[in-house]
Image (cartoon, helix red, strand yellow):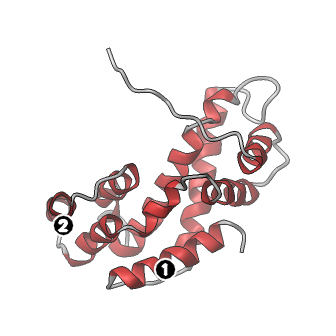
Amino acid sequence: MGTSVSHPSPTTLGWQAVAACYRNDSVPAERAVNEIWRAAQHESSPIVNDLFSNAVFLCQEAVRVSKNASAALKKATADIFKQQGNSIIAEIARRSIPIAFHAPDKLSGWQATFFAQVTDYLMSRDISGYIGKDYRNKTVSELALFKTTIKKEVKQTVLAMKAKPISHKEWMAYSKLILKKLSGG
C-alpha cells in the first residue's frame, strides 16, 4: 500500500483563476496555460524556481551531447547525483529524456516535453477535483483529453521558441523567456 500524499496548490487568487479555467469550458486552452504558469510563479515558495536549476540544465545537456536515450539518462542521473541537486522538477527533467530521442530534433523535443510535463504536474495537483456535471470535464475521459490539449499547447509554445542553450546561464535566460511566453507575456 502506498503512502504518498497529494499536495494541492495553494488557495491563492492565482490558483483560484486556474480553478475557474477547470470549471468553465469557454476558457480556451491557451488561457488555461497562462493562468497555470502565472499562479505557479506566485506561490510563496515557487516550484518553478527549480526550472532554472543546474540539475535541469544537466538533463538538457545530457540530451544535447548523448547519442541515445540510455546514455543521456545515465549521464544526467550521475551528474545530478554528483551535484546532489535532485528535486521533483529535476526528476521530471530526467524522465523527459527518453521521449526526446523520438523527436525529430532531440533537444527541442526534450525542452517541449519537459515544460509540458511540468505543466501536467502542476495541473495534477488539483484537477481531479474538477470532474463532474458542474465542471468543464464531465468525465475522466474528457479530463484526459483536456490535459492532452493543455500539454500540446505548451509544446507548441516551447517549440516556437527555438534555442539551444549550451551553458547554465543560457538555460536560465531561455527558461525565463519560456515562462514569460507561457504566462501570456
* Location of the N terminus (image quadrant): top left
Q: Is residue 176 above or below residue 73?
A: below
Q: From the viewer's perspective, tell me whether residue 12 is left or right of residue 86.
A: right
- Report whether 43 appears left or right of 35: left
Q: Residue at x 67, y 54 (%)?
A: 39
Distance between mark 2 and mark 1 Cα atoms: 24 Å
Query: Mark 2 — residue?
Result: 68
Question: Which mark is drawn over residue 74?
Answer: none
Tell me the residue at 51%/60% (across/down): 48
| Left-right relation of 17 to 143 | right
Which badge, 2 or 1, comes first in the chain's sequence? 2
Disc 1 marks which residue? 174
Label 1 sits on what residue type? Tyr
Which amino acid, by three-letter code, is at mark 2? Asn
Instruction: Please tell me in which quadrant of the rendered image residue 168 appears.
Output: bottom left
At mark 2, the secondary structure is: loop
**98, above or below 129, in the image:** below
